[in-house]
Amino acid sequence: MPAISLHSPQNSQGGGAINDLQRLTVSLRGGFEQQARCQLFRFTGQLDAYSDKQFGTFIAEHRSPGQPLVVDLSHIDFIDSSGLGALVQLAKQCNADKQTFLVVGNARVVQTVKLVRLEDYLHLQPDLATALDSLAA
């Protein structure tokens, strides 16, 4: 799969959207943007048992250890235990590589992550601006 890398002044600041998300499954789309401070992955749709493998593969194809990794799930409509498992696996890989890992969630994602008490382990952030600001600190 080709990398989606959009470089515009708005996107390099983290304020813009990755407009052309790549279809990973019928229900999940994803995009990747290399920013100055981090590797930013954005997803929309459903992160579930039907898409968790494609989610992991997409990140593995674009991830490079060393620079912080931010996963923006603020446009995810649904996440199940398989999606949470994919996030935990990614967090384990980042921890092993001593790579900063942050997850941005919306109300649905936050509720699900907090239900299983993974908010600290996944370094859950309320929004992308907060996540990017925490990297600058």
Image (cartoon, grey):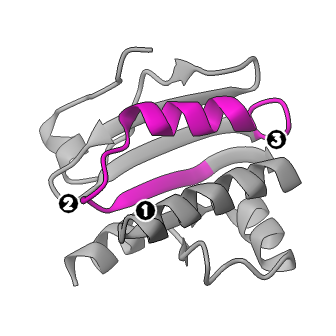
Query: Is residue 84 found left or right of 2 in the rendered image?
Result: right
Query: Is residue 108 found left or right of 98 in the rendered image?
Result: right
Amino acid at circle 2: Arg
User: Residue 42: percent from the left, percent from the top?
Assistant: 49, 42
User: Residue 13: percent from the left, percent from the top?
Assistant: 20, 53
Q: How far separated are the C-alphas under marks 2 and 1?
A: 13 Å
Q: Which residues are magenta?
A: 47-74
Residue 115 found in image quarter: bottom right
- Placement of the N terminus among the 4 image quadrants: top left
Amino acid at circle 1: Leu
Foreground mark, 2 or 1, reads 2
* Observer able to see residue 80: no
On the image, numbered disc 3 is attached to which residue? Answer: 48
Mark 1: which secondary structure?
helix
Foreground mark, 3 or 1, reads 3
Q: Which mark is residue 128?
A: 1
On the image, numbered disc 2 is attached to which residue? Answer: 37
User: Residue 113: percent from the left, percent from the top?
Assistant: 76, 70
Q: How far separated are the C-alphas under marks 3 and 2?
A: 29 Å
Of the image marks 3 and 1, the number of the one nearer the N terminus: 3
**In terms of depth relative to the viewer, which is nearer, 101 or 26?**
101
Amino acid at circle 3: Asp
Q: Residue at x 76, y 25 (%)?
A: 27
Q: How far separated are the C-alphas under marks 3 and 1?
A: 22 Å
Other-residue count near label 1 (Cα within 10 Å), few / some / many at <14 / 14–19 / ≥20 = many
Residue 94 drawn in magenta: no
